[in-house]
Amino acid sequence: MTTAMLSALRARLKSPSFNDSHQLLRTVSGTSRFKILTMLQLSPAGLTPTDIARVLNVSLSRVSHQLRILRDHRLVMTNEGSREVVYRIAPNKVVRQLLR
């Protein structure tokens, strides 16, 4: 391996895009979060936290926590037009590719 190639690889591993990609993969690698993203991918109209909790058979508090993490990383978005917030998967090419 040449010195130039070594330098290029080291620079790439320190780049902001590497860190962003790493954070995205860490976020979707959680089993609960990946299940939620998969459910949202299969439900284009979106799902409420209550719907998600029922399907996963977990507490609403746990679902809300996972949704907050996904929302903070811009992987899901909300529609707040009804009594309860409806979550949909965000238009993110990388996430949609992962969920195929």
Image (cartoon, grey):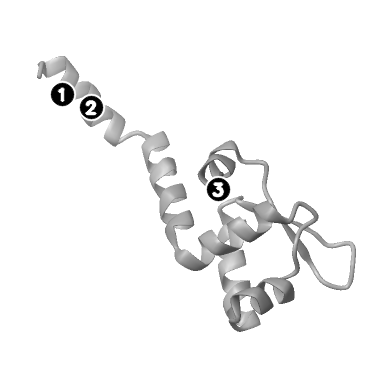
Which of 28 and 5 lies nearest the eye of the viewer?
Answer: 28
Above or below 59: residue 3: above
Q: Looking at numbered disc 1 in the image, what kind of residue is underneath it?
A: Leu
Q: Quadrant of the N terminus?
A: top left
- Give the side of residue 35 with respect to residue 17, left or right: right
Q: Nearer the viewer, residue 59 or 97?
A: 97
Give the vertical position of 19 relative to 45 (above or below).
above
Q: Quadrant of residue 81?
A: bottom right
Residue 71 pos. (x, y %): 62, 58
Which circle's residue, 1 or 3, is located before the other in the chain?
Answer: 1
**Which of these two is toward me, 97 or 10?**
97
In the figure, 2 relative to 24: above or below? above
Q: What kind of element bears circle 2?
A: helix
> Which residue in the structure is indicated by mark 3?
99
Whole-Å distance between the Cαs marked 2 and 1? 5 Å
* Residue topped by disc 2: 9
Q: How many marks?
A: 3
Task: In the rendered view, tell whether residue 41 sits above or below residue 93.
Answer: below
Residue marked by disc 1? 6
Could you say where residue 32 lies in the image, as x and y percent from the top left? 51, 68
**Residue in the picture at 79% in, 67% down:** 85
Image quadrant containing the C terminus: top right
The amino acid marked with disc number 2 is: Leu
